[in-house]
Amino acid sequence: MIGILSTIIPLVLALFAVVAVIYLSYIFSKYIALGASKMSGTKYMRVVDRLVLGQDKMMIIVQIGEKYYLAGVASQSVQIIKELAEEELIEMEAPASSAAFQQVMTFKNALQKHLEKKDHESK
């Protein structure tokens, strides 16, 4: 009986330590994320939308106060292309092909598909 207790107690303590580390990591990451959002948060402007054109090139729409600006961003420069009126901002629908790519296959679906394929091959 003492032999069993002497092996179970360290196991329980190790399990408790692992759970405590995971919990503290979770709390710490929330604290860090909150601090980072406060540091990077702006009061007078925000990026409304962005479109990546290449590895280091993108177009962004920035709202500053009541005005909107279309800007081109590259690795070494930022250029304001045009001031936009709010009426010019029309929300675009996602194309059907990108919606198909956005579907995430769950593990259960992947396993089921694999098993069905294996069953079909064995028949």
Image (cartoon, rainbow, N blue to C red):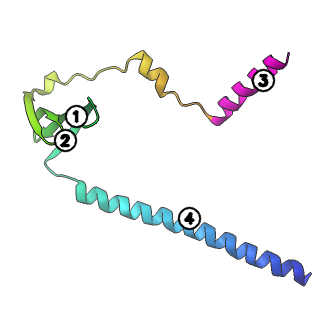
Query: Helix or strand or loop: what does disc 2 sit on?
Result: loop
Q: Specify which label sits upstream in the sequence, 3 or 4.
A: 4
Q: Residue at x 13, y 48 (%)?
A: 44
According to the image, label 4 marks what residue? Answer: 22
Between circles 4 and 2, the one closer to the viewer is: 2
Mark 1 closeness class: few <14, some 14–19, many ≥20 residues within 10 Å: some
- The boundaries of the magenta stretch are 107-123
23 sits to left or right of 75? right
Q: Chief secondary structure of the magenta span? A: helix
**Residue 39, horizontal then vertical, whole percent:** 24, 60
Q: Of the numbered discs in the image, which one, if any, rests on residue 118? A: 3
Amino acid tagged 2: Ser
Tags 2 and 1 touching, CB below 8 Å: yes
Q: State whether residue 62 is above or below residue 94.
A: below
Query: Is any part of residue 69 visible from this angle?
Result: yes
Q: State whether residue 45 is above or below residue 31.
A: above
* In magenta segment, residue 117: yes
Q: Specify which label sits upstream in the sequence, 2 or 3.
A: 2
**Residue 93, horizontal then vertical, whole percent:** 34, 20
Between circles 2 and 3, the one closer to the viewer is: 2
28 sits to left or right of 110? left
Mark 3 closeness class: few <14, some 14–19, many ≥20 residues within 10 Å: few
Query: Helix or strand or loop: what does disc 4 sit on?
Result: helix
Q: Specify which label sits upstream in the sequence, 4 or 2.
A: 4
Between circles 4 and 1, the one closer to the viewer is: 1
According to the image, label 2 marks what residue? Answer: 75
